[in-house]
Amino acid sequence: MTEPRPRIAVVVFPGSNDDRDAALAFERLGAEPVLVWHGDASLPDVAAVALPGGFSYGDYLRCGAIARFAPVMDAVQRFAAGGGLVLGICNGFQVLCEAGLLPGVLRPNATLSFVCRDVPLRVERTDTPFTARAERGQRLTIPVKHGEGCYFADEELLARLDANGQVALRYEDNPNGSVADIAGVVNETGNVFGLMPHPEHAVDPLLGSSDGALVLGSLVDAARERMLAAA
Amino acid sequence: MRATVLIRPKPGILDPQGEAVQTSLRRLGFPVGDTRVGRVVDLELDNGEPEQAREELERMCRQLLANPLIESYEITVAE
């Protein structure tokens, strides 16, 4: 018997460009992706929501600053507040930070160069719905491609993130100047996760790595559990 | 009425853009020191009451124009 496919929303902003890759990756990993337009005021019946990479609203002002006022974001806020699983990749991570769903902010890379390459990452937490398939300390290879991925949190916030164990992924070879090598963070309740690397571009060995499947597959597992629990 | 909002990276925040501008200016022979790059937003307001306008601009800054984690802002209202 095949396992039931949980529905996962992939939000499409004007300027999103990794939405279809994310949808394809979710499909391959056993989910049913549902593309949701940014102008929609509500979310369809889904077990998780993903905000994809890209350049929403041209990244005017600050990356993610305008996208967070998209009509669908009110629904995403409510979904997250109710404990719903929300994943933000790259631009999606920037949107979640600007929206206050995740702590911190993403700034221009310290080198000012756009970086586009595979980077090694270290898994710091495996007790989240986004990393459960990985092992603590496991080294993952997942590509980054961004000009503004330098994660910043002031000392006070950084101490809080450490105390709460909110840093789920760290760079082993920091490509952008992020403080404390932070590549991905979860919120305090662990149901919202954002990361700069692109797991959706690393789900097939043909593309050099399938480590991204550990991240997205973890989310598919968690979404399926929630779907079955709700049924 | 017209207003200007000046947004700057907070002191201590790494400003790679400012560093790149500084390097270029030095290459041109200008012996500049610490250089920071911010952003200017010029806008027109329907509000005719300066106090109210200022209060509204404060809210604009907090909600959208600046990110308080990394940026400070300065509001000027032309009266």
Image (cartoon, coloured by chain):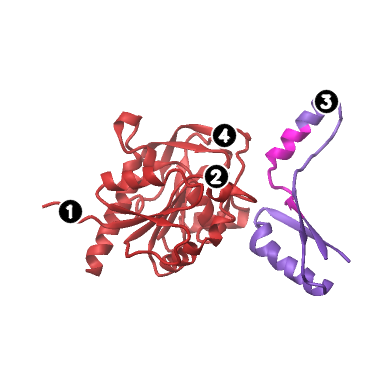
Chain colours: A red, B purple
Q: Secondary structure at mark 1?
A: loop
Tell me where residue A72 appears, x and y as whole percent: 47, 62
Residue A121 visible in the shown view: yes
Q: Residue at x 32, y 36 (%)?
A: A210
**Is A47 colored magenta in this rendering?**
no
Tell me the distance, in whole angstroms, between the alpha carbons under discs 3 and 1. 65 Å
* Among numbered discs 4 and 2, the one appearing first in the sequence: 4
Q: Which residue is mark 3?
A: B28
- Helix, strand or loop at disc 3? loop
State the separation of the CA atoms marked 3 and 2. Answer: 35 Å
Query: Decide: marks 3, 2 in contact (CB < 8 A)?
Result: no
Residue at 47 percent of width and 37 percent of height: A144
Q: Amino acid at mark 3?
A: Leu
The span picked out in magenta is B6-22
Residue under pointer 4? A114
Vertically, is B27 above or below A45? Answer: above
Distance from Cα at disc 3 to Cα at disc 4: 25 Å
